[in-house]
Amino acid sequence: MQQEQIVVNAIIDGEKITTEKLAPRENPARPNEIVGYYPINTREEAAKAIDSAANAFPGWAKTPMKERVERMRNAVQKIKDAAPEIAKLLSTEHGKPLYDAEGEIGVSLMWMEFACDHAEEVLRNEVIEHSTGKTIIAKDPKGVISAITPWNYPLSLSTIKIAPALLAGNTMVLKPSPLAPLAVTKVAEMIADEFPKGVLNIVNGESEIGVELTTNPKVAKIAFTGGTRTATHIMKSAADTIKDMTLELGGNDAAVILKDFDVNDDRAMRRLVISNFLTAGQICMIAKRVYVDRAIYDQFVEKYIEAANKWIRVGDPFNKDVTIGPVNNKKQAEFVQSLIDDAVSKGAKAIKLGKVLDQDLFETGYFLQPTLVLDAVYNDPIVVEEQFGPTLPILPFDGDQHAIELVNDSIYGLTSSVWGEEEHAIEVAKQIQAGTTMINTAAVQGLDVRFPFGGVKQSGIGREYGKEGILAYTDTHVINIPKVGELPYIPE
């Protein structure tokens, strides 16, 4: 579907900033097609955006909560009204099917509305009367927030930061990924237009922008979603000025299939397939490795292949019959294929899943047919690394304790899932090292914006979503008012 090319701009202090240096964003389904252009802003422009946010902060921090919420609700309505066009743009530049793009907008709006509904309650001062006087526990805004977001879910992983930060009284500079910059910049501009100048600024560009956003002393907090390796550089950059940060990082999320899982449950098997291959496997919380009790392994693999072949249809993201589009970019597609090739070279078996609906398009774009990998070794790269693409290793385990050891033997701990009889699954889940463990579902299907989300180990620091995701953008400020009078334990 050819779409009119668009150009997005930086927003600094409420003004659109045009730049001579523009970069194209290609359509991953048709790489010769340019979807639009985004600016390559300079480090100096990033510094100006930070200055703008710093100047806007004192006034915005004093703005009554009712006004903050009203402005955010106005932004929500604008996004709702523009949702069909946003979804088309996101689908075209990203490669995810249209239904998937619409779903991402839905999650974004759901979270923004939750944050609006609960901001006043969560951020209200707590007043405690006690025997020695009175204490006020205030939730103060931090100041300028640098938000650096990825390409896989650009809208939801930006609004997850924008909504609570601004509602809490902070100001922000947002930097989207160059691999999906258009729709998110459009959405961020809609939000920025509803707020005073400088409250929300947007810059696009390369790594030098990120350096400014992580080292500038006027930045109080960094909110980053992306790779663990990049996060190590961010932490080092932020060390000199001791910045607060929320990091949602990589994951190699495991699914454990217990021996009491019903392999004939078609709906459960479909949920599992979707949890492995939605968005072509390019979701941080996707189930990327599956461990199956050896007692049901052969039956499970047979039924899994059957379910996958029913659901997976690869092709044009605008084809309503398509469930999986292309990989977002050439580099990622090549990386995923290299993991499959490596496993096969060591004796593993690769099984193509589903149908390719348009072979000519498939060969034109960055498409990979979803691939099941059997007989891999537990420590093969395809098992221990985050594939972030449409491939899945399935391996057997011998007893629950073995499964728990396999899951926990990882540097990551974002999400996990356990599939089987509920009480049995819960007992296993309690022993898994992860920020979230889902029972008989996984990935986006088990996400609930009302509750905190984040990782353990090298999958991140801090939590987003839920009330904790709002409080993450505040500092606790204790104000003590003691009773008047001398304290008996202090000598004269």
Image (cartoon, helix red, strand yellow):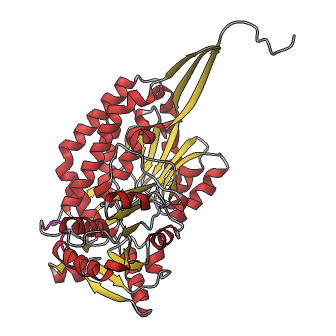
Side of 246 where 258 appears, left or right: left
| Residue shown at 45% from the left, 52% from the top | 454
Tell me the quarter of the image containing the N terminus: bottom left
Q: Residue at x 35, y 72 (%)?
A: 389
Residue drawn at 35 percent across, 62 percent down = 152
The kind of secondary structure the magenta stretch mainly shows is loop
Q: Quadrant of the C terminus?
A: top right
Q: How many marks?
A: 0
> Does residue 416 lie above or below 288 as drawn?
above
Say if 164 sits above or below 204 in the image: above
- Residue 283 visible to the viewer: no
Image height check: is 138 above or below 448? Answer: above
Q: Quadrant of residue 256?
A: bottom left
Tell me where residue 281 appears, x and y as whole percent.
33, 69
Q: Nearer the viewer, residue 446 or 187?
A: 446
Q: Is residue 156 magenta?
A: no
Using the rendered image of the protein, determine whether residue 36 is visible from the camera's viewpoint.
Answer: yes
Q: Residue furthest left?
A: 320
Report the span colored magenta: 315-319
